[in-house]
């Protein structure tokens, strides 16, 4: 169950990272509320996952999921560049996440 908590914590991390862009410096109410709620859910789920997983592994996987998801949504939603080098680096992060899961 801890890995499930961690996975969803990572998804909510993506939500708040992307949400920050839409808050426009916390000047837009609805995106700000959604971003803060995503932060709370993400941290709560991470805390639940940490009951059973090593902190170093859980934190690295949590941030890795957030990083990969945020980078991909940045490309898809925000028109950020999708260069071969950038996509290769994202793939390396995914490989690291898988490696940490296998090693845990």
Image (cartoon, rainbow, N blue to C red):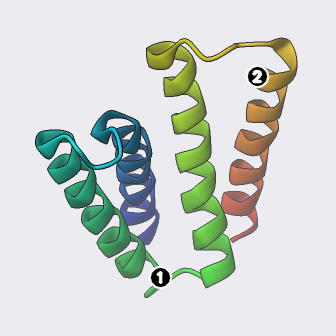
Please name which of the two marks, 1 or 2, marks the residue nearer to the observer: 2
Q: In this rendering, is residue 97 above or below 68?
A: below
Q: Which mark is residue 50?
A: 1
Under tag 1, what secondary structure? Answer: loop
Residue 66 at least partly seen = yes
Residue 38 x, y percent position in the rendering: 27, 55
Q: Which residue shows up at 23% across the image and 44% down it?
A: 27
Q: Which residue shows up at 72% across the image and 61% down it?
A: 100
Dividing the image into 4 quarters, which one contains the N terminus?
A: bottom left
Q: Is residue 71 left or right of residue 45?
A: right
Residue farthest to the left? 30
Q: Which residue shows up at 77% across the image and 55% down it?
A: 99
Residue 1 at least partly seen = no
Distance (Cα) linking label 1 and label 2: 30 Å
Pick the front one: 28 or 92: 28
Residue 5 x, y percent position in the rendering: 36, 64
Residue farthest to the bottom? 51
In which quadrant of the rendered view does residue 60 lie?
bottom right
Under tag 2, what secondary structure? Answer: helix
Q: Which residue is mark 2?
A: 87
Q: Could you classify mark 2 by the number of other residues whose Cα lies within 10 Å: few (under 14), some (14-19), or many (20 or more)? A: some
Q: Is residue 104 left or right of residue 65?
A: right
Q: In this rendering, is residue 38 above or below 52?
A: above
Q: Which residue shows up at 36% across the image and 71% down it?
A: 43
């Amino acid at each position: 169950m801890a890995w499930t908590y961690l996975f969803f914590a990572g998804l909510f991390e993506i939500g708040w990272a992307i949400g920050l862009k839409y808050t426009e410096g916390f000047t837009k109410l609805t995106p700000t509320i959604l971003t803060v709620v995503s932060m709370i859910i993400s941290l709560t789920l991470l805390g639940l996952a940490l009951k059973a997983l090593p902190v170093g592994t859980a934190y690295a996987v949590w941030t890795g999921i957030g990083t990969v998801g945020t980078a991909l949504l940045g490309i898809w939603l925000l028109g950020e560049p999708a260069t071969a080098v950038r996509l290769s680096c994202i793939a390396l992060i995914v490989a690291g996440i898988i490696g940490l899961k296998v090693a845990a």
